[in-house]
Image (tube, helix red, strand yellow):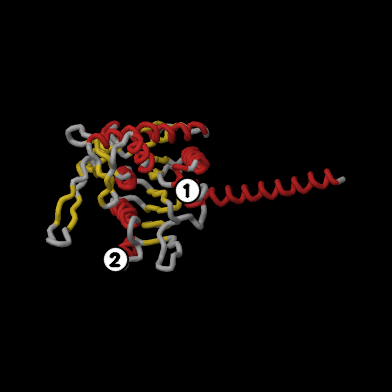
Amino acid sequence: MTELKDTSRNAGAAQSDWLEKANILSEALPFMKRYSGATFVIKYGGHAMGDDSLARDFARDVVLLKQVGINPVVVHGGGPQIGRMLERLKIQSEFVDGLRKTDRETVDVVEMVLSGSINKSIVSAIQEVGGKAVGLSGKDGSLIQARRLRRTRRDPESNIEKILDLGFVGEPHAIDPEILEAFAETDFIPVIAPIGVGPTGETYNINADTAAGAIAAALSATRLFLLTDVPGVLDGQGTLIPDLSPDRARELIDEGVIRGGMIPKIETCLAAVDQGVDAAVILDGRVPHALLIEIFTDGGAGTLIGEA
């Protein structure tokens, strides 16, 4: 009798799980219809990329997006992995205003790590869960045409602005989306390393957020997603702000509510929205299936900037 009762309880629990999953699918259906055929550019990095379980979740999520008719384009970072490789090779790194100063020796390592081991591991993860993926760098098909990033710093004593030499750190000058548009008509998910090519063929290391924003703008993407290690944009009391208009986002920067490393992320989002992306979302990549929660539920999971 005890065994029969246990079986009955397990069956009841299983039925409850099935009903919950059915409700989730029912809630997701309108969003699937809404975004069918849309292009989503996803910047993948931070803690989510270094955690095996979260990496598998991310791969499954991206494959699901492709299977329901959405066109995902993944742009990945890799700062910690680059740092570890430079240490192994005994190459010293210097950071200026949060950017890795990149000489010729360093940029070779950056390209090797980003376009090689990291890029192919993401491609493999997507394929292991049943998707199809192809790895690219911004040099392939002249996807990301870059120029040297210029930064200045004002000397506090002389009050003179000095140009900082960051070496082969670049910024997108032009994006040629032709190769990505071709993949949109296939089952393949493009996975892009943020390496750009200069006017004379030189290699540039580009911030992954910046590269993703420029690619999203060039593709007129419906959404730009920046996966981070924070829940999103927080107000002065530390509470998540679910939606922000571009004007309000700029006000929060001026008021000092948005500060530090969040400022360049917000500026990337604003630039993308200004150039035709419907909306940009900053969300916590440490949360399992954060992408799916953001896309397929009413509540969302991060901070959306632009059109709701």
Which residue appears at 48% of the width and 55% of the height?
301
Residue 188 image point, x, y percent: 42, 32
Question: Is 45 or 271 nearer to us in this picture?
Answer: 45
**Discs 2/1, front:** 2
Left or right side of 276 for 13: right
Left or right side of 192 for 4: right
Quick check: 214 above or below 193? below
For the N terminus, which image quadrant? top right
Residue 236 image point, x, y percent: 40, 68
Residue 262 image point, x, y percent: 35, 56
Left or right side of 199 for 7: right
Q: In the image as oriented, which residue stretches furthest toward the right? A: 1
Sequence-earlier tag: 2 or 1: 2
Residue 212 image point, x, y percent: 34, 45
Q: Residue 84 occupies which quadrant of the picture?
A: top left
Q: Badge 1: how crowded within 10 Å, few (<14), some, or many (20+)?
A: many
Q: Tell me, for residue 254, which label it has, or none.
A: 2
Can you see residue 118?
Answer: yes
Q: Badge 2: how crowded within 10 Å, few (<14), some, or many (20+)?
A: few
Q: Tell me, for residue 291, which label it has, or none.
A: 1
For the C terminus, which image quadrant? bottom left
Q: CA distance from mark 2 to mark 1?
A: 29 Å
Residue type beneath disc 1: Leu
Q: Residue 92 occupies which quadrant of the picture?
A: top left
Q: Which element carries disc 1, helix, strand or loop?
A: helix
Quick check: 66 above or below 26? above
Q: In the image as oriented, which residue stretches furthest toward the front? A: 90
Question: Is 171 or 242 nearer to us in this picture?
Answer: 171
Residue type beneath disc 2: Asp
Q: Which element carries disc 2, helix, strand or loop?
A: helix
Which residue appears at 42% of the width and 42% of the height?
37
